[in-house]
Amino acid sequence: MPAVKKRRKRVIRRRLKKEVVFVALAFILFLYICISIPSLFTSNKLAKLGYDQDAIAVIKELKLSDLLLDNQWYSDQLNEALKQDSFRSDLIELYLATDALSNDDLLLYDRLATSYSKEDLISCFQQLEFYEMTPLLVFDPIEDLSGYIQDVLNHRAQNSSDHFELSNSYVTYYQDTEPTEDPGSITMLVNKHFYLSESFIPENLVEMSVKYASKGVQMTQEAYDAFAQMCDAMNQEGLSMYASSTYRSYQYQQELYDDYVKRDGEQEADTYAARPGFSEHQTGLTADLASSSGGLSKFGESAEYQWMLQHAHQYGWILRYPEGKETLTGYDAEPWHWRYVGAETAAKVQASGLTYDEYYLLYLQK
Ligand SMILES: [Zn+2]
């Protein structure tokens, strides 16, 4: 082959190589543009809606762009929430419906979601305060939640986190009852829904010293230790009280209840006495208190009661049936009836402002 031809072939090959490289590069560039331009558009649109760059990154990662853009959904709260670890993409509508959603709100939502639809709950969270929704944990499932919301709104003026009453009753006692979970634990819930079996007797029951109690009454060792410490601290401030009634066996409660029913009828007896198995006294963690000056019936008016309201939680004791929460506990106010749940839980219950019935169902139930 002549040398000229050879050279020309080499030149053509080199040129071809250059062209292949060029086409490949152009193709890569084309791909890059195809992928990045719509994404840039999306970012731009999300930014226009109000989301900031960090939130947009999360929106893209969670593939929420279309949902948010199609519905034109934006709120400052959602923008902030997106950047937090606790963000729940399944509850976007809830973030949009409220001003702020705490972890407690999310927990309450999940607890209520077992009985109510997403739409109903969003409507609740939109219109009601936390303390106006926690009663739903205790109440029977309500068919028409809008009726409940209206009832709550009608009572806004007189209700607060300390006092909660409504026109209608939303709870039936002693119906669809369940055995309490974890019987024997210091946090077990016993009320007119959760009961202890006939055979349940708390472990470590000890007879209390007459220094702290009426003669012959018993309490579990742990509750008693805390009770004695509490009484000693109270004594140092010149106040004094004692436990007049503590542990009651199932059988004893049965006798009490039967006597009340004989005297006043079942309906009346149910308003002031627990049915056997449903009395918190069977836990061995409960005390009816009497001040040394005024006894049990006037305990609510005593300085000892005021001291208890301030300090009892430090020793693990809580007031079980507060005034203004009768519809939640199922009991008329009983300033003398206190319950041991341990110092850690008691402090949290105190801080929450909830009844123990609500607190347990929100935070402790498995
Ligand atoms: Zn009691």
Image (cartoon, grey):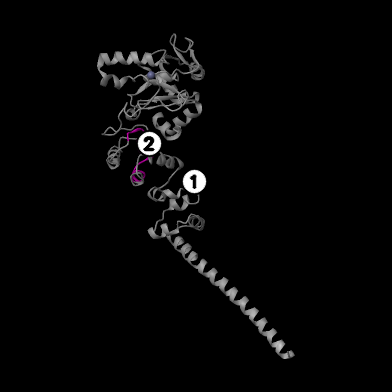
From the viewer's side, name the closer residue of 323 and 171: 171
Task: Check residue 280 for magenta coloring.
Answer: no
Which percent across, then down, holds residue 7?
Answer: 71, 87
Label 2 CA crowd tier, 10 Å (few <14, some 14–19, many 20+) = many
What residue lies at 39% left-to-right and 32% top-to-bottom?
358
Q: Secondary structure at mark 1?
A: loop
Mark 2 — residue?
Answer: 134
From the viewer's side, name the closer residue of 151 and 9: 9
Q: Does 199 appear above or below 155?
A: above
Image side of residue 311 versus residue 178, left or right: right
**Disc 1 and disc 2: Cα gap in Å?**
21 Å
Residue placed farthest to the right in the image? 3
Identify residue type, mark 2. Thr
Ligand 1 lies in quarter: top left
Label 1 CA crowd tier, 10 Å (few <14, some 14–19, many 20+) = few
Q: What residue span does the magenta drawing correspond to? A: 123-140
From the viewer's side, name the closer residue of 362 and 296: 362
Q: Secondary structure at mark 2?
A: loop
Q: Does 45 appear above or below 325?
A: below
Label 1, ligand 1: CB separation under 8 Å:
no
Mark 1 — residue?
Answer: 86
Task: Check residue 135 for magenta coloring.
Answer: yes
From the viewer's side, name the closer residue of 117 and 154: 117
Q: Main secondary structure of the magenta part?
A: helix
* Occupied quadrant, residue 9: bottom right
* Quadrant the C terminus occupies: top left
Which percent across, then down, holds residue 93?
Answer: 39, 50
Label 2, ligand 1: CB separation under 8 Å:
no
Which percent across, then down, holds residue 26?
Answer: 57, 74
Residue placed farthest to the front in the image? 1
What residue lies at 44% left-to-right and 30% top-to-bottom?
349
